[in-house]
Amino acid sequence: MGTRRTFTAEFKTERVLEVLTGDFTPAELCRRHQLSPQQLAAWKAEFLANASLVFQRDRESEVLAERVHELERVVGRLTLELDAAKKVSRFLS
């Protein structure tokens, strides 16, 4: 009984892109890399189903960057308020 092969995400991506760009036919890739047509089709389907996530991540990054910027402003304001409170407490004591 043979052992199962594992493939990296980069390998899968390269094979799917080769099919999508028309560089190779699915049959050629399957023969060249000893893959089953079903496996290649599954990789292609998963790739296409998750393609929109690339753009969602960009939007999520923008939202996170905005949140970080807002929190930095709050920290800066609180730091100024703390410094002012320390100065006032020195004068009062």
Image (cartoon, grey):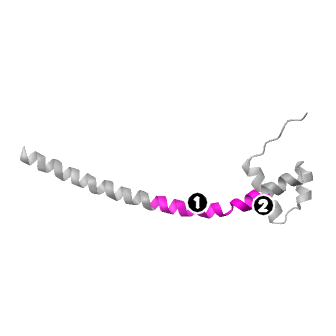
Give the amino acid at mark 1.
Arg
The magenta stretch spans residue 93: no
Q: Which mark is residue 17?
A: 2
Q: Which mark is residue 57?
A: 1
> Which quarter of the figure is the C terminus placed in?
top left
Q: Residue at the spot x=77%, y=52% of the render?
A: 12
Cα–Cα gap, marks 2 and 1:
20 Å
Q: Quadrant of residue 80?
A: bottom left
Count of numbered tags? 2
Asked which secondary structure carries label 2, the reply is helix
Residue 5: % across, % down:
82, 41
The magenta stretch spans residue 48: yes
> Is residue 34 shown above or below 20?
above
Asked which secondary structure carries label 1, the reply is helix
Q: Which mark is residue 39?
A: none
> In front here: 49 or 32?
49
Residue 79: % across, % down:
26, 52
Q: Which segment did they paint magenta?
A: 44-65
Residue 81: % across, % down:
22, 54
Q: Residue at the spot x=20%, y=50% of the render?
A: 83
Residue 11: % across, % down:
77, 50
- Mark 2 is surrounded, within 10 Å at the Cα level, by few (under 14), some (14 to 19) or many (20 or more) other residues, namely some
Dominant secondary-structure state across the stretch colored magenta: helix
